[in-house]
Amino acid sequence: MPAIAESAVEAVSAVNDGSTVLMGGFGNAGQPMELIDALLESGSTDLTVVNNNAGQGDAGLALLIKERRVKKIICSFPRQSDSWHFDTAYRAGEIELELVPQGNLAERLRAAGAGIGAFYTPTGYGTALAEGKETRQIHGRNYVLEYPLRGDVALIKALYADHEGNLVYRKTARNFGPVMAAAAAQTVVQVDQLLPTGEIDPETVITPGLYVDTITVVPSASAAARGEAPADAAQAA
């Protein structure tokens, strides 16, 4: 059964200096902003962060990069119109970038959770992204060998959890959450609502509680707009 943290700061206490942190989110959709803010407050530094992007605007991951708390970013889309904090750090040589095609990123995470040692993919073959990597021709097609991408801690966002840690996501906010939860040694989840065990239909569970270590309730503005009152963390399962 996962621990129920009373605050986001308590929830991220497992993130140590030098940790590899998997952060859910596709842009802002599904990004665990409050957990990232708590990580900023905690003082953890020298982090390797895995995310689809390299932060945007002046919120979430972008602020960690601004404060030079991230030594390396592994992502698919490092640059966009408002990625100025990453741009500044990268041009100054203050952050390392590992660029990974989005499909490869998702599959490397999935492979980590599934216990797969490595896999071959055609994506990236013949480009700078394949330099120094093993290649192989299979059935007349060229492939690149890629390895699993594991994390010390995953920070993800879900809509609901029960006291067993079973998770339900909201639409596209699901994105990398399920594969990151399985790929990390510890998974920390912020949810809109914590429900008594048994209230979530098993057929709707996306991430089983087996992959969840810590839950904290952070009601979102959208949940408030829908008139949903968060379940009290102290309710009996």
Image (cartoon, rainbow, N blue to C red):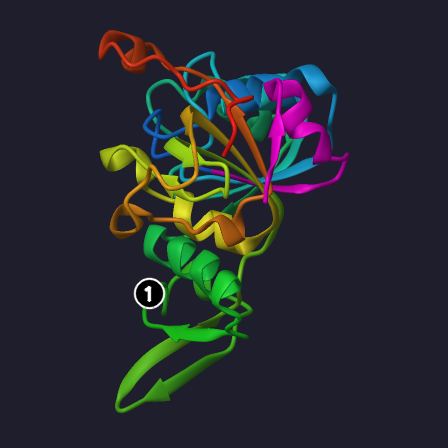
Q: Does the magenta portion include 190?
A: no
Q: Can residue 78 be seen from the camera position used here?
A: no
Q: Left or right of 163: which side holds 126?
A: left
SS at circle 1? loop
Q: Is residue 196 above or below residue 221?
A: below
Q: In this view, which residue lies farthest toward the bottom?
A: 139
Q: Nearer the viewer, residue 150 or 206?
A: 206
Count of numbered circles on the image: 1
Q: Does the magenta portion include 20?
A: yes
Residue 229: x %, y % from top left: 34, 12
Q: Left or right of 70: which side holds 218?
A: left
Residue that carries the numbered disc 1 in the rendered image:
123
Q: Indicate the amino acid at tag 1.
A: Thr
Q: Is residue 42 above or below residue 147?
A: above
Q: Over which residues does the magenta segment extend? A: 1-23
Residue 162: x %, y % from top left: 44, 36
Q: In this view, which residue lies farthest toward the right?
A: 17
Residue 23: x %, y % from top left: 50, 37
